[in-house]
Image (cartoon, grey):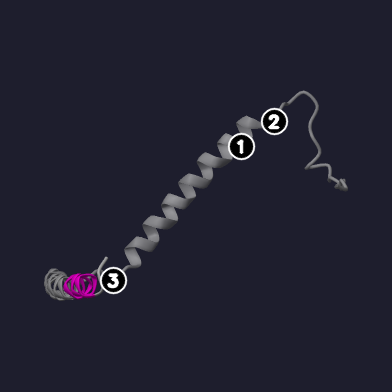
Amino acid sequence: MATQSAKMSKEEAPQGGTGSGLPQKITGTIENTHAFLQETRVEMRKVTWPSREDVISTTGVVLATVAFFAIYLYFVEQGAARAVGYLLKRFGA
């Protein structure tokens, strides 16, 4: 494998005796987190939230749909199981 060397600017060059710059990284992380949370709060205020009635009605639709497909798939599975059972009896297994 070939190795590549990169030229570093003075800002990127390692500083003698300062280690990895961990205190600056931690401070930067805390500042970034604070800014992220502020921006998130601002964006959450812009959200148009559904009314209670909308949530209740859509929840009802979802529950009805899930119940319908649960019953439908139960009968499909029962039919498939009977068909496989019939084939195994008919042709021997």
The relative height of residue 62 versus residue 37 in the rendered view (above or below) is below
The stretch drawn in magenta includes residue 29? no
- The residue carrying mark 1 is 25
Identify the image quadrant of residue 47: bottom left
Q: Secondary structure at mark 3?
A: loop
Q: Residues within 10 Å of mark 1 (few under 14, many from 20)?
A: few
Nearer the observer, 29 or 62: 62
Q: Secondary structure at mark 2?
A: loop
Residue 22 lies left or right of residue 75; in this view the side is right
Q: Please, what is the dominant secondary structure of the magenta stretch?
A: helix
Question: Residue drawn at (23%, 72%), measured in percent from left and top?
Answer: 84
- The residue carrying mark 3 is 48
Give the alpha-carbon distance from disc 2 to disc 1, as whole Å: 9 Å
**Amino acid type for the residue under numbered disc 2:** Ser
The mark that comes first in sequence, 1 or 3, is 1
Residue 69 lies left or right of residue 37; in this view the side is left
- The residue carrying mark 2 is 20
Magenta region: 80-90
Nearer the observer, 27 or 78: 78
The relative height of residue 26 versus residue 16 in the rendered view (above or below) is below
**Where is residue 20 drawn, in percent x and y?**
69, 30
**Amino acid type for the residue under numbered disc 3:** Thr
**Amino acid type for the residue under numbered disc 1:** Lys
Residue 92 lies left or right of residue 70; in this view the side is right
Identify the image quadrant of residue 29: top right
